[in-house]
Every structure is written in C-alpha cells, then in structure tokens.
Amino acid sequence: MAATAIKRHTLPTRLLHWVNALCVFLVLMSGLNIFNADPRLYWGQFGAITDKALLTIGSPGIPGWATLPTWRDLATARHWHFFLAWVLIFSSALYLLISLFGGHVRRDLLPARSEIAPSHIAHDLWNHLRLRFPTGEAARRYNVLQKLSYLGVIFLLAPLILATGLTMSPGFDAACPWLLTLFGGRQSARTLHFGAAMLVALFIVVHLTMVVLAGPLNEIRSMITGRYVLPAAKSE
Amino acid sequence: MLLRSGTAFGGLLLGGCDRLSRSPTFEGILASADSLTYRVQRLLVGNALAREFTPAELSPVFRSNGTDDPDTDEYNALRENGFVDWRLMIGGLVARPLALSLAQLRALPQRTQITRHDCVEGWSAIGKWSGVPLGTVLDLAQPSPAARFIVLYCADELEEGDGGYYESIDLIDAYHPQTLLAYALNDKPLAVGNGAPLRLRVERQLGYKHAKYLMRVEAVADLKVIGRGKGGYWEDRGYAWYAGI
C-alpha cells in the first residue's frame, strides 16, 4: 500500500514555529542567566537575601551550558532577554492573528466535544504511555493530548509569562498596578514567571521526545516543507 | 545519531551566541530594544505614580547594596561632622546655581512615601522614604531650555581609581512627584549603608538609578561627554540607561 502524503502545516505556521523555537530557546537561557544574579525565589510584594525564600538554588546557580551567555553576565543576558521578548511579542501577535482568523485554532487546535470526554483522554494517554501513536487516517489531525498541550502553551503559559514579566517592571507597574494585586506582588510574579518558564522547558522536552518517537525525519520535514506522510498502521 | 546532531547543533548555537554577545555591533542591535522599551513605556506609563504601600508592608530589613561606605577622606571628614559641612551643589545648565545644606533641604516642602525598591539582580525591598522632590529643587535652580537630563554625582567609587558613581535621568523622571532627594529611611536619617546624607529615589526605575551619597546635581544637554558616555556608572559597564524594566 502506497504511503499517503498530506500537507500538514501552512507556511505561516512553519515559519513562525522556527522563529519561536529559536527565540524561546534563547529567551529561556538568557532568563536563567538573569535568575543566577539572585538564585532565590520569594513570595509577596518584597523579598531579598534578608527575607525568607521559597526556593534557593545554591551557588554556583544554574550551570553555564544552560545559560546565555554561558558566563555570568547580567547586563548582556538582560539585553538578550528583552530583545527576544520584543521579537516574541511581534511573532506571537502575528501567529495569533493568522491562527485565529485563518481558522488554524478552530480547525486544528480546539478539541471536539467528544475528544475532551475523560474516557477519550484517558484512552489517548494510555496509548501514549505505551508509545502507541495514531496511524493512518487518525494521524491526519492532532490528537487530543497534542491539542491540549499546544493550547495550554499558547493560551495559558505564554500570556502568564508575558504578564508576570511585565509585573516585574517597575515602570509598567506604575501604569498597571492591578497586575501587582493579581499576582500578589512583584516577587510572587517573579516566582510565577520562573515556574511558567520551567513548564515551557518541560513542554519542549516532551515535544522533542515525541518528535523522536513519532519518526523524526517525517515530523521535522512536515515542519519545514509541510509534507507529512501518514504513518502506516503497524500489523500486530 | 539524532542526539549527537542535536548536541552538536546546541553547541554551535551556544558558541555562536557567546561570540555574538562579545561583539559590540551585535550588542548595539540587542540594545536597540532598550530604546523601544523606553519609548513604549513613556507612552503607556505617562506620569503615573508607582504603587505606594502601607506601613504593615515594610520589609523587616532594608538591605544595603553596592557601596555600603564610600570611605574616602573627603566623605569621612563630612561624616565625622554629622554632614553639617556637606553641601549639595546644583549647577550645569541652570540660571541659579545653588549650594544647599542638609538643614536647607529639610526646610523645603517634604514628601514621604512607602515604595518598593527593585534591584536589577531580582530582589525587592519596601522602605519608607522622606525627602524633598527633585522638581522643587530644580524649580529653585531654574534649568535652561537646553537642559535635557539631570546628572547626579556621588561621593563613592565602586572600583578604586575608576571614576565616581554617577547616574542620570530624563526630565520626565526628574520632575515626577515621587522622584525625591531623600534624607530619611523608615523615619531615621539615612544610614551610611543606604546613602547618607542624601540619595535619589526614582521609583519607576531599578535600584542602580537611585544614586546614593549625592554631592552634585547637574542639568546637561548631552550625556556623551560624561564618564564613558552612557549616562551612568553601570550604564558605562553594559547596563541599560532606561531601567524601567
């Protein structure tokens, strides 16, 4: 039986995927360099070395291979971080515009009512844990776990990271003091910013693992040229 | 194979980014985001006030950071005398240069505010500051229309022989009602660790803008001719001039 090839991702999705992939990697790493300047997390309006910390990462902090630049340099890391944050604001706005009005969100990301039934999610989860992925026609669309994790990153984590990031800005706080009320203070916002960033890092790890398990060449090609070959059903 | 090429790609990316981080041209590109941030924040924030807190929200300890004692002969002499011989010199592009004593500053209309101090490193502390609004002092000195920035010169040197600490702000921040020449923290005269006898409070920016141990205030048209030209001690060492983020 000849393999069926489909066009999986539109050009804007592919282009913005790679822009975001590069920026998210670098913004995470520059964020870790910034974190190393005071590797403690606090809760509330204030928090400093004289106060109780929620979490303390002892010296030397996050290792250099995970930070940008690889040496301790708060000034340069901040330049990277804010530059990339601006790029991500523009690329995300573009993505949202295209995906909301172009139908990508409705067509490909929003799960159908039947898909969010607990029994369906449990079934998909069980198959994933056994490394059994959709094949044939079922692989034409994202499965419900993919849909929920993409939606979670796009509509929960990304806005949370942006809002908590802005809450750390003393200038922006003056314009929007309600952000301080919403997150319970600048130091709470910093902790939430870090936590949400770690969840994005977790998403990347799982995402890359799934790409490798699902057939890396086919998956990566589909995000470059758009061409995706539906995996054939394994005969048992 | 995949893991190896992934690691190789990661290494290449990191090495490339490290090289870019050392390139002055690329640093300039990255820093261009600073002026975007500055313009957007000035547009969005306008003259809005920083959040003020209640006495119940004060940090138990307001820590000292950066210089905790200038320890120069000049400063030590002033300190021994309780700063009675200290004068704040106000000059540059002003119609009436001034030399104000601590007593004269205390006699001017006072403002007290409980605000949050945010260090560029990430931590925050809440303190109660009293002082005279910088705008009040500038009104006395009458800056000329050519003045675009206010430069603050300090008594401390963070690295010996490397020029003194200094900072600069634009006129919007200089005349902002919460921008103070502060002489008291938590109802006590400023301790040496916190910048005695006088420090700047510029509440909508990060801690390094809040120059301590003030000696001289100057209205200027251009920052390029001061220090290494970037508008402040830390700015000359790579940090952003606008520290509202």
Image (cartoon, rainbow, N blue to C red):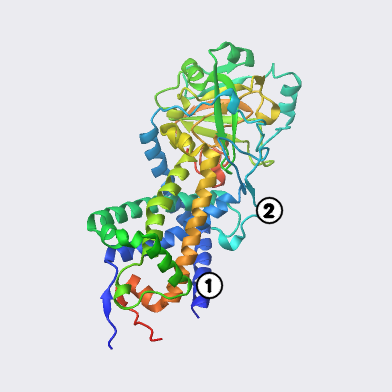
Give the crowd class for mark 1: few <14, some 14-19, many >=20 residues within 10 Å. Answer: few
The answer to which of A131 and A227 lies nearer the viewer is A131
Amino acid beneath label 2: Ser
Chain identity of mark 1: B
The percent coordinates of residue A139 (x first, y second) are 33, 73
Mark seen at residue B7: 1
Outermost residue, top direction? B107
* Mark 2 nearby-residue class (10 Å; few <14, some 14–19, many ≥20): few
Image x and y of residue A48, in percent: 63, 39
* Residue A225 visible here: no
Q: Callout 1: helix, strand or loop? A: helix
Q: Which residue is mark 2?
A: A59
B141 sits left or right of A16 in the view: right
In the image, B9 versus A206, the foreground residue is A206
Residue drawn at x 23%, y 54% as measured from the top left: A101
Q: Considering only vertical position in the picture, is A229 above or below B210?
A: below
* Quarter-of-image position of residue B60: top right
Q: Nearer the viewer, residue A210 or B23?
A: A210
2 and 1 marks in contact (CB < 8 Å): no
- Distance from the alpha carbon under mark 2 to that under mark 1: 26 Å
Residue B77: tell me if it is visible.
yes
Q: Amino acid at mark 1?
A: Thr
On the image, the x and y values in percent for residue A134 come to: 36, 74
- Residue B144 picture quarter: top left
Tell me: B23 left or right of B75. Answer: left
Residue A1 location, x and y as percent? 28, 88
